[in-house]
Amino acid sequence: MFKIFKIYRWKEQAKFKLADPNRKISDEYFRVLKNQSKGNCVSCGVGKIKSYVIDKDKNITKTIIKFSCGHAHTEVLVEEILKLRESVKALLVPEGKGKRNFVIQHIQGWFKSNNPNLKDGVLKDQIIDRRNDKYKEKVVNASNKKEIIKDQEHSLSEHQGYGSAKFKK
């Protein structure tokens, strides 16, 4: 049953590729897909499927199909999972002033951490509001969102001696 289903999917994938009007296909690949959609040998178009072997190793799937005409067809599928992360920085700047003279700065999103215990990084939400003299920062472990690393809210005038504003020794 498993082999029949896989062969059916193999045929259906070819039919799907042939039906896509936006896909640009060379003449040779078109012939291969046409034979595949019928379940025939992809090389000569005459032989029928004789045997089917799937070799799956981690993220690589190798499929070998042997046909009655003696030809064999090998497909290799490589799957990779990508982690996409985003962050944003927004500034409210008075007209005619540079970005260093911002009124409000809001930083939010994922950031890499130098801490070896935080391999997946951190989620940070920081607001610096010069107009209302407020500073708010919340940092959470990206892999365990319940673990709060830092959560502080106070007036901006009290927020001294951090980052580039540290006193030089």
Image: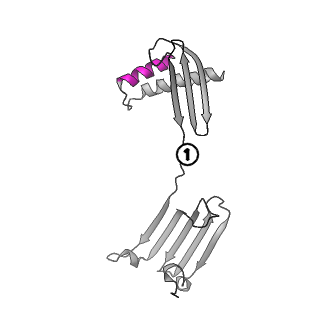
Q: Is residue 34 magenta?
A: yes
Q: Is residue 132 above or below residue 29?
A: below
Looking at the picture, how far across and down is residue 33, in whole percent?
44, 22
Looking at the picture, how far across and down is residue 137, in whole percent?
57, 73
The quadrant of the picture occupied by the N terminus is top right
- For image coordinates 46% across by 19% down, the residue present is 42
- For image coordinates 52% across by 56% down, the residue present is 85
Residue hosting label 1:
81
Q: Is residue 64 above or below residue 156?
A: above
Looking at the picture, how far across and down is residue 159, in whole percent?
55, 83
Q: Amino acid at mark 1?
A: Ile
Give the crowd class for mark 1: few <14, some 14-19, many >=20 residues within 10 Å.
Answer: few
Q: How many marks?
A: 1
- Which quadrant holds residue 56? top right
Relative horizontal placement of residue 115, taking residue 18 as reference (left or right): right
- Which quadrant holds residue 54? top right
Q: Main secondary structure of the magenta part?
A: helix
Looking at the picture, how far across and down is residue 123, in whole percent?
57, 63
| Label 1 secondary element | loop
- Please tell me which residue lies in front, 97 or 57: 57
- For image coordinates 58% across by 39% down, the residue present is 59
Q: Is residue 105 above or below residue 13?
A: below
